[in-house]
Image (cartoon, grey):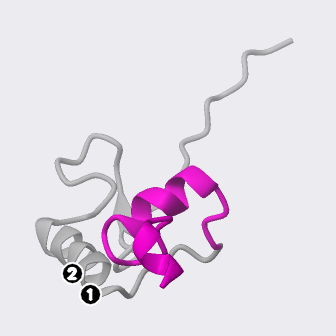
Amino acid sequence: MPAKKKSAKLLRCPTCAELVRLTDEDFPFCSDRCRKIDLGKWASGVYKISSPVLDPDVLDDLGAFGGGHSKSSDDDD
């Protein structure tokens, strides 16, 4: 049985879809520019987690930041 050739998987920059090598300095992006564009999308809220947080401990932690309801005695008024 002959040895199998290891096929190279083509990877593309998530911002512009240009081909990227694993050894590239800005991997998985093709350039620093594309890396910064992606970071800007995260910072501006373009990317979102699609499913709600259902873990009660995580919800309590989020409440401490003002984004949810906390179980303090002030809520009973």
Dot label at residue 11: none
Q: Residues within 10 Å of mark 1 (few under 14, many from 20)?
A: few
Q: Which residue is mark 2?
A: 40
Most distant residue in the top direction: 1
Q: From which residue to which does the magenta span run?
A: 52-77
Q: Is residue 30 left or right of residue 74?
A: left
Q: Position of residue 1 (x, y in %)?
A: 86, 11
**Rendered residue at 52%/78% (across/down):** 76
Most distant residue in the left direction: 32
Q: Which of the 4 quarters of the picture holds residue 18?
A: bottom left
Q: Is residue 2 left or right of residue 42?
A: right
Residue 59 in the magenta stretch? The answer is yes
The kind of residue tagged 1 is: Ser
**Rendered residue at 53%/73% (across/down):** 49
Q: Is residue 3 left or right of residue 38?
A: right
Q: Position of residue 14 (x, y in %)?
A: 40, 71
Query: Can residue 10 be seen here?
Result: no
1 and 2 marks in contact (CB < 8 Å): yes
Closer to the camera in the image, 19 or 57: 57
Spatial CA distance of label 1 from label 2 is 6 Å
Closer to the camera in the image, 17 or 70: 70
Q: Secondary structure at mark 1?
A: helix
Dot label at residue 44: 1
